[in-house]
């Protein structure tokens, strides 16, 4: 392939210049090699490129000269859709997804818009339009509509007052159950932490059943009494109360905080409480079981034992739960409760 001397000089300057783009240098070297009589295969081997690359730029130069070595102008920014398409995208994203899917994907939205507006729009364009409007139909955040209980703040204040200023000489307990604690063993052993790497844990596991606990937290001391239960019902719950009633000195009044679980509000339980007048119950408001201090103990138990635990059997799980309770009681301290039960206000 013959080239003009002036063109060759420009190509040589491009190759020699430290300011030339790498892609411009490569294309110039391909053309110069072709002008020296090398075949496409030889050019590819010498410059360590594919034969197709050598053929492409050699052909582009032969057809268009130096202009052929420039990049072809791209198509530019994505197509701008009219307001009817944007409205269709927003309407789809804010509607219920098609059965049986639980959330919208950008691809599914694009398909729905194509079916309704007869306009083809890409999933990536759907994503750009929704991002500009701060709409994220693929994300789900849980929330709860709490019942408008007329005495919510009175009950919350009563529970907190019991924690902050317990009656002199009385025992104050916080009682609840933690059910369905899974005994799972990892299929492969974990790897301990190393510099720059956290502990690694196999995600596959085997199930070995579940265990349930009922626990009573002494609010004054922080000590906890637990018992493994097989059924979470009123009979099991009152049997645990019987155990506590026998263990606590007869002359002491007992104040207990309970949530509205079925085993706590059953007729059998209320009859038991009525038959034991030294027991005084403070019920947490609906959807406010977090006011029950024993939940703080259950949270620590979950983090320290259950969440990343490896249990060979249900008995192994129970043994480790009981060992944690024993260790907790050896250094138990009361929880520092600061919430007063008054409506929270923004600062």
Image (cartoon, helix red, strand yellow):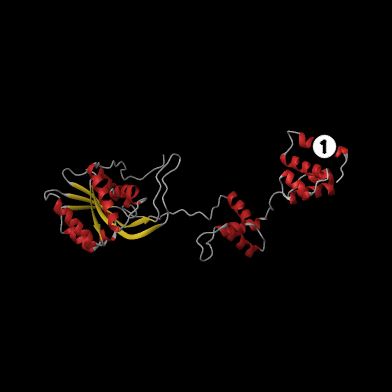
Side of 18 relative to 284 (left or right): right
Q: Position of residue 188 (x, y in %)?
A: 40, 54
Q: Position of residue 281 (x, y in %)?
A: 22, 53
Asked where in the image residue 87 lies, by quadrant, the reply is bottom right
Identified at 82% across, 46% down, the residue is: 61
Residue 262 horizontal/vertical position (percent): 28, 61
Q: Please count the marks in the image.
A: 1
Camera-side residue of 288 and 21 = 21
Q: Quadrant of the C terminus?
A: top left
Q: Nearer the viewer, residue 227 or 162?
A: 227
Element on which disc 1 rests: helix
- Looking at the picture, tell me which residue is in the foreground, 230 or 149: 230
291 or 342: nearer the viewer: 291
Residue 200 in sight here? yes
User: Image quarter for residue 195?
Assistant: top left
Q: Residue furthest left?
A: 251
The residue at the point 84 percent across, 36 percent down is 9
Residue at 18% over, 47% down: 171
Outermost residue toward the top in this view: 18
Q: Residues within 10 Å of mark 1 (few under 14, many from 20)?
A: few
Q: Is residue 153 visible?
A: no
Q: Is residue 191 left or right of residue 6?
A: left
Residue of label 1: 10
Question: Which residue lies most toward the bottom here?
Answer: 99
- Residue 298 to residue 120: above or below: above
- How far from the left and from the top, in percent, is residue 46? 74, 44
């Amino acid at each position: 392939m013959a080239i003009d001397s002036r063109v060759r000089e420009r190509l040589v300057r491009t190759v020699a210049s430290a300011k030339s783009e790498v892609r411009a240098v490569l294309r110039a070297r391909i053309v110069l090699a072709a002008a020296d009589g090398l075949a496409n295969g030889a050019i590819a081997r010498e410059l360590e490129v594919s034969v197709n690359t050598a053929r492409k730029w050699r052909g582009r130069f032969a057809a268009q000269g130096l202009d052929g070595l420039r990049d072809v102008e791209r198509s530019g920014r994505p197509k701008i859709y009219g307001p009817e398409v944007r409205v269709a995208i927003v309407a789809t994203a804010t509607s219920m997804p098609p059965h049986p899917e639980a959330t919208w994907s950008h691809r599914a939205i694009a398909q729905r818009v194509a079916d309704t507006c007869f306009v083809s729009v890409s999933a990536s364009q759907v994503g750009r339009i929704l991002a500009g409007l701060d709409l994220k139909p693929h994300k789900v955040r849980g929330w709860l509509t709490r019942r408008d209980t007329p005495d919510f703040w009175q009950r919350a204040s009563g529970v907190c007052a019991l924690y902050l200023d317990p009656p002199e000489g009385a025992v104050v307990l916080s009682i609840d159950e933690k059910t369905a604690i899974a005994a799972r063993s990892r299929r492969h052993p974990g790897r301990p932490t190393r510099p720059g790497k956290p502990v690694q844990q196999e995600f596959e596991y085997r199930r070995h059943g579940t265990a349930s606990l009922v626990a009573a937290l002494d609010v004054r001391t922080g000590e906890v009494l637990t018992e493994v239960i097989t059924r979470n019902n009123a009979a099991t719950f009152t049997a645990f109360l019987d155990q506590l009633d026998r263990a606590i000195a007869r002359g002491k009044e007992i104040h207990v905080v309970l949530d509205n679980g079925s085993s706590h509000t059953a007729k059998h339980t209320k009859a038991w409480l009525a038959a034991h007048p030294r027991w005084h119950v403070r019920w947490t408001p609906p959807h406010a079981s977090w006011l029950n201090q024993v939940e703080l103990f259950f949270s620590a138990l979950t983090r320290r034992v259950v969440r990343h635990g490896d249990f060979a059997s249900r008995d192994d799980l129970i043994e480790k739960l009981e060992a944690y309770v024993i260790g907790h009681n050896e250094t138990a301290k009361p929880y520092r409760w600061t919430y007063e039960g008054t409506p929270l206000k923004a600062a």
